[in-house]
Amino acid sequence: SAMAAQMTDAHRRFLQVLMSHGIMEGSEARKLHQRSCEIHKVYYAHDKLDHFISTINSHLQPLFMQIRKGMSEGDGRAHYALVNLAETEITKMASDYAENELELFRKTMDLIMLSENGFASSTDILNLADQLKTKKMKKKEAEQVLKVFVEDKWLSENNGEYTLHTRCIIEMEQYILNNYQDVARKCNICHSLAIQSQVCESCGTGMHLPCVKKYFRAQTEPRCPQCNDFWTLDVP
Amino acid sequence: QADDADDDLIPTPTHSQVQRNLARHPQDQLNQRASELVQYLLVRDQKKIPIRRADILKKIIREYRDVYSEIIARARKTLEQVFGLQLVEIDPKHHIYILISTLPRTPGENLHRDNQVAKLGLLIVILSFIFMKGNLVKDGSSLLLPRLITSVPPRERHEVFGDVKKLITEEFVRQKYLEITP
């Protein structure tokens, strides 16, 4: 069982590299798994990545850390992130950013959570900058801060619109579900938090775009999995 | 510094004193404190900020000062066994630590995020420059160097490095790669 399995240098190497990246895409993680086992001459089987990670997780558990798997909402790809379970996640960011930067992040998260499509426009976020209660920020400064949030993988940017980075969603899922109870949506198919989603016009059920695509692939007609009404929205 | 002076006033407990002190604290509390210390060390190390013992005592150990050597020992063990990281004292006078990997280095390994790699590249060029000049570079000529490499006048923002002067005179100094003496 995973509990009994010892950490080897292969596990440690995997953990060090994942830690320095914060989050890794599935194929990257598989390559790293293979390379780590090869370098340290540890038994390797290509389909044993999850077991390999369970071993690491059993040792991370007393430290309130875990390697968690999540899906990117954009392309549906699996990602692995090292998350900290000990504190509520905003306080974890607290040591990295100034008070007003954290306030800007929280307000950006509000905009994202309250939006239709899971995105907040650059314009809307920058307009918040000089209304901050902690300490006002000039637009130029706020632009820089947003850039740092993107670099640090809390936010993702696409054509001037910002959403939560996959890493942020994996780390903060519980925080978001607790603090945005009324607006936070769970995907009807995979049951994980959905920031970007398509919503059924009849019954209001929401799903991740990659999950919707996958679900409809197996059907002749696109129909809502919840109420069975015809799905009217465009599935890319 | 006031914190360092505070540090020196702790008499180093003897082994038997530590054992007696340990009995006073519940085991799970000690382990909890050691876990917090591991997390603190990892976070500081990720940012490449050297860790001061004074900070460890003030922020993490706090009221468990009497058994701090035991907590540090437990944290050390966890870091080695789970992460393959070693806590190394780089400054015995001011008690400053860094974490280094115990794993053998392999070529072509990218442990850092992209702009970190770029910063290290710049740093290596600077260090080479300093080395060639005999380990000491007067301030005027050292600022010439980044201008030569980056073609950015000191006050403008560079695309990758941002505020170049700040990077060299503050960040690299804080990370203990460079030292500026007045």
Image (spheres, rainbow, N blue to C red):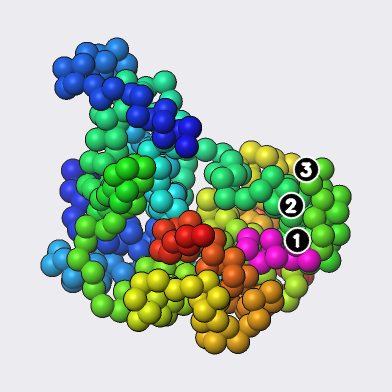
Residue A117 sits in which quadrant? bottom right
Q: Work out whether mark 1 precedes mark 3 in sequence or the reverse, and give the earlier one.
A: 3
2 and 1 marks in contact (CB < 8 Å) = yes
| Viewer-closest of A100 and A105 | A100
Residue A104 is tagged as: 2
Chain ID at mark 1: A
Chain ID at mark 2: A
Query: B36 left or right of B109?
Result: right
- At a point 47% along the width and 70% down the height, the residue shown is B116
Query: B17 left or right of B99?
Result: left
When the figure is inspected, residue A235 is found, relative to residue A211, above or below; the finding is: below
1 and 3 marks in contact (CB < 8 Å) = no
When the figure is inspected, residue A45 is found, relative to residue B46, above or below; the finding is: below
Q: Write the start and end of the magenta stretch as one range.
A: A140-149
Q: Do marks 1 and 3 share a subunit?
A: yes
**Number of marks in picture:** 3
Q: Amino acid at mark 2?
A: Leu
Q: Residues within 10 Å of mark 1 (few under 14, many from 20)?
A: many
The alpha-carbon separation of the residues under discs 3 and 2 comes to 10 Å
